[in-house]
Every structure is written in structure tokens, then in C-alpha cells.
């Protein structure tokens, strides 16, 4: 899987999420970074759809975390934007469900990496000149390196 992607449309961002569904496994942590409107939720929607999640995947901004079941793997979708510390993450008790699920955390950099031995960081951005999104996949750990660079 390529590490750098140009995503001209929201559907392209969802397609990248769907491609990630082909390489994720139980216990995986995916940390999404980037500014507002960069495509974090759209990527998670594509991942959820490809996993077979039957319900809509929407931003968990106000509920902070949602668990989507019914697909190949449970999807835990977290928005850490309003979390200020590792203690706030601990209060969510996410580690109770991470072993059997794929956990995707928006705005989680610096807060959630300790939930798993390895994780994938997806750096999403919007170009200023044409509003096209870009994504860079950054593996943290040998397992993710092997999956992205077979």
C-alpha cells in the first residue's frame, strides 16, 4: 500500500479508508491527525463501510466515542478533540475493547498511542490552493511497516 495519497474528492478519502480495512486486524490502533475538514471522519466512514458496519459512521464529537458492531471487526471511533490529557483518555476505558476491535482516534496524537504496542498514524491535510486532501501513512512499529510495505 502506498504511503502518500492525493485525495481529490471525499469519495477518494473514503476509498483510502476502505483500502485500510483490507490490512487492519483486531487490536489495531489508527490515529488520524489533521486540521478541521481534512477528511478524518470520511476516511473512517470508508473503513467502516469496508468492514461491513451496517450503521452510519458519523463524527463522535459530542459523544466522544462510538462502537460500531456487525462488521468483520468491531470499529471503535473516538474523537479526542475535547480530551485534554491521557487521564481523560483513561476515563473512556478504551483499552477494554481494543483487543478485539479496530480503534480509530481523531485528534488523538500524543494522547492514545500507549493503547497499543504499534499504531498507524494517518496525517491528513487540505491543500490551500485547490482544497484537495492529502494523506500520509506513518507506521509506528514493525507490524505496520510490514503491512504497508509487503
Image: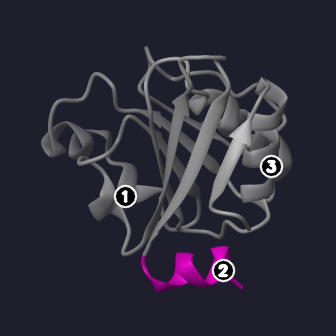
* Secondary structure character of the magenta stretch overall: helix
Q: Is residue 143 magenta?
A: yes
Please provide percent x and percent y for residue 39.
Answer: 61, 28
Q: Which dot marks residue 18?
A: 3
Mark toward the start of the polypeptide (2 vs 1): 1
Q: Is residue 75 above or below residue 10?
A: below
Identify the residue under disc 2.
149
Q: Nearer the viewer, mark 3 or mark 1?
A: 3
Cα separation, mark 3 vs mark 1, equals: 24 Å
In the rendered structure, the answer to whether residue 41 lies left or right of residue 33 reads right
Residue 73, position in %: x, y?
72, 58
Frontmost of labels 3 and 2 is 2
Q: Is residue 82 above or below residue 17?
A: above
Which residue occupies 77% across, 29% down? 8
Q: Is residue 24 left or right of residue 101?
A: right
* Secondary element at image label 3: helix
Amino acid at each position: 500500500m502506498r504511503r502518500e495519497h492525493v485525495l481529490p474528492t471525499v469519495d477518494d478519502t473514503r476509498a483510502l479508508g476502505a483500502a485500510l480495512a483490507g490490512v487492519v486486524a483486531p487490536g489495531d490502533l489508527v490515529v488520524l491527525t489533521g486540521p478541521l475538514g481534512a477528511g478524518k471522519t470520511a476516511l473512517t466512514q470508508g473503513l467502516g463501510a469496508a468492514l461491513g458496519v451496517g450503521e452510519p459512521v458519523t463524527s463522535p464529537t459530542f459523544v466522544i466515542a462510538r462502537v460500531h458492531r456487525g462488521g468483520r471487526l468491531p470499529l471503535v471511533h473516538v474523537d479526542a478533540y475535547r480530551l485534554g490529557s491521557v487521564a481523560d483518555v483513561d476515563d473512556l476505558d478504551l483499552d477494554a475493547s481494543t483487543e478485539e476491535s479496530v480503534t480509530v482516534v481523531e485528534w488523538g496524537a500524543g494522547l492514545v498511542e500507549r493503547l497499543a504496542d504499534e499504531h498507524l498514524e494517518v496525517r491528513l491535510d487540505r491543500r490551500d490552493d485547490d482544497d484537495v486532501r492529502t494523506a500520509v501513512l506513518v507506521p509506528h512499529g514493525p507490524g505496520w511497516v510490514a503491512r504497508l510495505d509487503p
